[in-house]
Amino acid sequence: MVGESPPLGHDDERGDVAASESGVRTERAEPSDLDAWDLDAHVEPVAGASAVPAVTVTNPPGTVTVSAFPDGRVAGIELSPKASELTEDELAAEIVVIAGLASQDAKSAQFTSMLEGMRAQGHDDAATRDFLGRDLDLPSPEQARAERARVFATRYPDDHE
């Protein structure tokens, strides 16, 4: 009923917050939402997500592959067996770099799609490109390719052609 307090000893979210604020640790028997961070866990695809194209970028050593949705959100991360040779810090940095490139590539695909749509509506290409870059912060495909080439050339000088 509204306004009633849970019985004394009832394990609710407020109790967990109070316990964590007081420094007291409690063990929970049921699974935690944090268990989802297991990198080995299988992730089921979201219903309808296959209809949304994702852009994928793999680093030159082939250890990290990141896919991103058109809005730049990460859709998935794949690690090769060789990734286990990296330290935790190296792997984290690699994932962040490749995720950033995948995000830029995905946003550049959105840039292209919007540019084509605006062109079909009769809008000027130069003004539309300016709007997409300045107001919507979408990189052009040329900008995304240039950034990927720059990162690959500086980060992987031995692997980059």
Image (spheres, grey):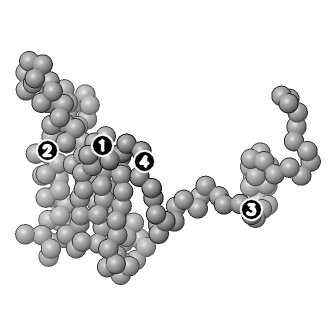
Q: CA distance from mark 1 to mark 3?
A: 38 Å
The quadrant where residue 4 appears: top right
Can residue 19 be seen? yes
* Amino acid, disc 4: Val
Q: CA distance from mark 4 to mark 3?
A: 28 Å
Q: CA distance from mark 3 to mark 2?
A: 48 Å
Residue assigned mark 4:
46
In the picture as drawn, the residue positioned furthest to the bottom comes out as 85
Can residue 103 be seen? no
Residue contact between numbered discs 4 and 3, judged by CB atoms under 8 Å: no
Q: Residues within 10 Å of mark 3 (few under 14, many from 20)?
A: few
In the picture as drawn, the residue positioned furthest to the right comes out as 8
* Amino acid, disc 1: Ala
Q: Position of residue 6 (x, y in %)?
A: 87, 42
Residue assigned mark 3:
28
Q: CA distance from mark 1 to mark 2?
A: 22 Å
Q: Earlier in the sequence, mark 2 or mark 4?
A: 4
Residue assigned mark 1:
51
Q: Earlier in the sequence, mark 3 or mark 2?
A: 3
Q: Earlier in the sequence, mark 4 or mark 3?
A: 3
Residue assigned mark 2:
141
Q: Which mark is residue 18?
A: none
Q: CA distance from mark 1 to mark 4?
A: 10 Å
Q: CA distance from mark 2 to mark 4?
A: 27 Å
Which residue is at 13% across, 44% downward? Answer: 141
Q: Residues within 10 Å of mark 2 (few under 14, many from 20)?
A: some
Residue contact between numbered discs 1 and 4, judged by CB atoms under 8 Å: no
Q: Which numbered mark, 2 or 4, is in the foreground of this view?
A: 4
